[in-house]
Image: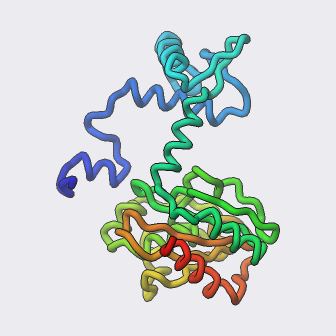
Amino acid sequence: MANPADPADAEEMTGEEPSDLIRSVSRALRVLEQVAQSDRPLTVKVIARRCGLKLSTSYHLVRTLCYEGYLHRLPSGDYLLGSQVAERFHEMLLAFQRPPRAGVVLRHVADTTGHTVYLARLAEGRLVIAEVAEGPRSPWLEDLQTGLEAAPHATALGKALLLTLSPRARGAVLGTSPLPRFTSATPATAEDVEAELWGLRPGRIVEEHGQFREEVACAGVEVPGGTPEERWSIGFSTLGLEIPPWAPSVLHGAARDLAGS
């Protein structure tokens, strides 16, 4: 088990730059991020400019990433993401070891309620969406899709998991700087989140009303069992700021089904 006093662990928890940062790895990841975020293939010159790198350095990185399969070179000389990125994405989802019946349970809730249902967990302080079952009564939320990271402080899924953590562990996830604002209702600080969670116990339904997206509400609850680091949350979204009265019974039932699967 890692020593909590290890400086490397502290850097990982706080998101600070590690003292032994390998610059070439960091630059390669910046190249991948820029290519991934672009709506069209990029030339090496554009990659270099967007990453703030020398052109020669960018050529070395791009060639290496192409050789390893993380970038693909088009006949035009432009670059887009390679097949190995999809392979790592698939392996990441498998590594989370979702409850065996997760897909069945989420699809059942979505079919019976008409609302989009999500399964999520915390990974290294980040909230990751592991599975989604879409429903017609919820808006499509582009930031709450399988494999994407979401904001724990502004989502019911995240807050349900924050409830399972100690105050110190919650502080490590939320950090000390102002939190990203998505709407005027988004909590601005860790203290704001703590005030919202005050009096709630793990296993209680957590709601958020318009904090992640305007005119969208979400409810979530933890899936019982396992350590806090292995815990899941299940939740749903709805158009409008009202949570349906059936939410607690449906979510608790789904959480029990997932825990027993």
Residue 128 in sight from this viewpoint: yes
What colour-coding does the image apply? rainbow
Q: Residue at x 56, y 82 (%)?
A: 252
Instruction: Establish if 15 lies above or below 183.
Output: above
Q: Quadrant of residue 89?
A: top right
Q: Residue at x 37, y 49 (%)?
A: 15
**Residue 75 x, y percent position in the rendering:** 72, 11
Residue 210 located left or right of residue 66:
right
* 148 relative position to 18: left or right: right
* Residue at 65% in and 54% down: 145
Quadrant assignment for the N terminus: bottom left
Q: Nearer the viewer, residue 134 or 38?
A: 134
Residue at 76 percent across and 60 percent down: it is 140
Task: Residue 80: name its quadrant.
Answer: top right
| Residue 126 % position (x, y) | 46, 56
| Residue furthest right in the image | 136
Image quadrant of residue 81? Answer: top right
Residue 192 visible in rendering: no
- Where residue 88 appears, as percent x and y from the top left, is 52, 38
Q: As displayed, is residue 55 above or below residue 220?
A: above
The percent coordinates of residue 152 (x first, y second) are 51, 64
49 or 8: nearer the viewer: 8
Count the numbered circles shown. Answer: 0
Q: Is residue 92 left or right of residue 14?
A: right
